[in-house]
Image: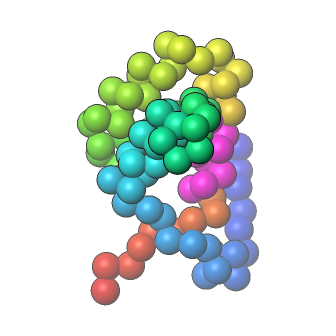
């Protein structure tokens, strides 16, 4: 699969959250802390992204969630994670 982006889209993209921020979003979605609703797809997405940045706890939670989710739900979470990466850019460390 090939993805292309315009320079403008990359310039206007929001910064990527840190692994710790993504981990916390995953916890919130998996426990329903903020909304009172458990959203396993969103939780898996954030844990997946946090794991990609080296967060080992996120990796463990993602594995646990995968056991509770259907194949379609995991696929949707992965699609959402890819979409996030396409629409966000790395933070500059300047």
Q: Nearer the viewer, residue 90 or 27?
A: 27
Q: Residue at x 27, y 36 (%)?
A: 56
**Quadrant hosting residue 58:** top left
The question of residue 38 being in magenta is answered with: no
Q: Nearer the viewer, residue 61 or 38?
A: 38
Left or right relative to 64: residue 4: right
The answer to whether residue 52 is seen in the rendering is: no
Q: Residue at x 64, y 80 (%)?
A: 12
Left or right relative to 75: residue 34: left
Q: Main secondary structure of the magenta part?
A: helix
Where is residue 10? Give x, y as percent: 62, 75
Left or right relative to 25: residue 79: right
> Number of callouts in the render?
0
Q: Residue at x 37, y 41 (%)?
A: 51
The question of residue 78 being in magenta is answered with: yes
Q: Quadrant of the C terminus?
A: bottom left
Q: Nearer the viewer, residue 29 or 65?
A: 29
Q: Quadrant of the N terminus?
A: top right
Q: Is residue 19 above or below residue 69?
A: below
Q: Is residue 63 above or below residue 42?
A: above
Q: Which residues are magenta?
A: 77-85
Where is residue 80? Give x, y as percent: 65, 44
Where is residue 79? Give x, y as percent: 66, 40
The answer to whether residue 23 is seen in the rendering is: yes
């Amino acid at each position: 699969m090939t993805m292309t982006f315009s320079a403008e889209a990359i310039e206007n993209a929001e910064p990527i959250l840190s692994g710790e921020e993504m981990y916390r979003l995953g916890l919130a979605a998996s426990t329903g802390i903020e909304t009172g609703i458990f959203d396993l797809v969103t939780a898996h997405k954030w844990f997946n992204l946090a794991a990609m940045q080296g967060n080992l706890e996120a990796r463990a939670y993602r594995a646990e969630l995968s056991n509770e989710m259907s194949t379609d739900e995991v696929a949707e979470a992965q699609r959402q994670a890819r979409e996030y990466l396409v629409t966000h850019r790395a933070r500059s460390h300047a």
